Image: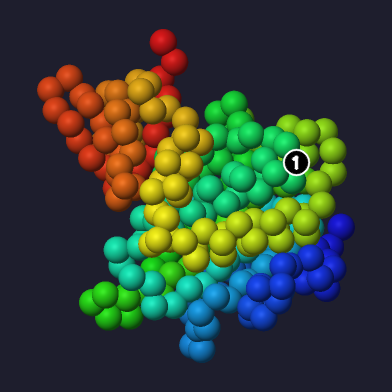
Amino acid sequence: MKFNIEYFKTLLPENLQSIEIEYFDEIDSTNSYLLHRKDFLDRILVIADFQTAGRGRFNRKWYSNPGENLMFSIGLKNVDLADLPKLSFITSLSVQEAIEETLNLQLKIKWPNDLISDNKKVCGILIETQIQNIEKAKVVIGIGINVNQTNFPDEIKDKSTSLKLLLKIEINREILLSKILDLYFKYINIISSDFETIYQKYKSKCTGIGQKVSVLFGDNIYTGILSDINRSGELELLTENSKISFNSGEITIIKE
Ligand code: BTN
């Protein structure tokens, strides 16, 4: 079923009624659209029902059937460069909590910001930045959630799942998205004043802390104990003879 943008707008809380929203039945990628937009506004939301060139982290493709999932990007301007890791925490936390609150389903955050159930991915997040000056950046936060899709391409079918597959019910995408945005902008408002709450909540939802993991970073794989995720969003790995911090990468939990 087509995403109902008019119905969606009626669900938004009062304080979000004035944000700029653009909806596309089809677009190349909501992230690319915002990155290339000349008159980039602060707090703009772009939603698409289908992407012909959806992008993921590490230049991967983001596959999503038309009319079944959530694909959207939030654009922010004048973001302090120091706040970028905090935005990453806020994004996965808002989606995790919105799913928990509206659907009573507890997903785990897999560092840095995938949402998974039983090691299968439900949501991916791609945060892209354009530096405005030495302190500030324009940020595009792209979020893809597998909501009502039940068939995945061979390439990803073993590592993907959806809310519908997990809960065995058709999910109302408009309600879920309005809840995510409600939480997202609540967290943005306390990003500096109450960062500690955000950080502790984020960590409490993360999987793998204290466990043996491998980290794929570039072409190298490092194995050790995931000892912590620090306040800058870096993963700390204790290997046999050292402690290494990663600011990006992909982890696999090693079950022993
Ligand atoms: C990942 O897990 O690799 C990140 C996936 C991010 C996908 C979303 S869908 C909306 C936005 N537009 C894109 O092209 N990508 C992000």
Find residue 171 and report its horizontal and vertical position in percent.
81, 47
The answer to whether any part of residue 155 appears in the image is no
Q: Is residue 221 left or right of residue 8?
A: left
Type of amino acid at the residue the image marks with label 1: Leu
Q: Nearer the viewer, residue 140 or 68?
A: 140
Against 236, residue 224 (above or below) is above
Q: Nearer the viewer, residue 62 or 203?
A: 203
Task: Tell me the residue that label 1 is attached to.
Answer: 103
Against 140, residue 100 (above or below) is above
Quadrant hosting residue 239: top left
Against 115, residue 129 (above or below) is below
Outermost residue to the bottom: 39
Quadrant hosting residue 178: bottom right
Q: Is residue 93 left or right of residue 5?
A: left
Find residue 45 and report its horizontal and vertical position in percent.
61, 72
Q: Residue at x 55, y 34 (%)?
A: 108
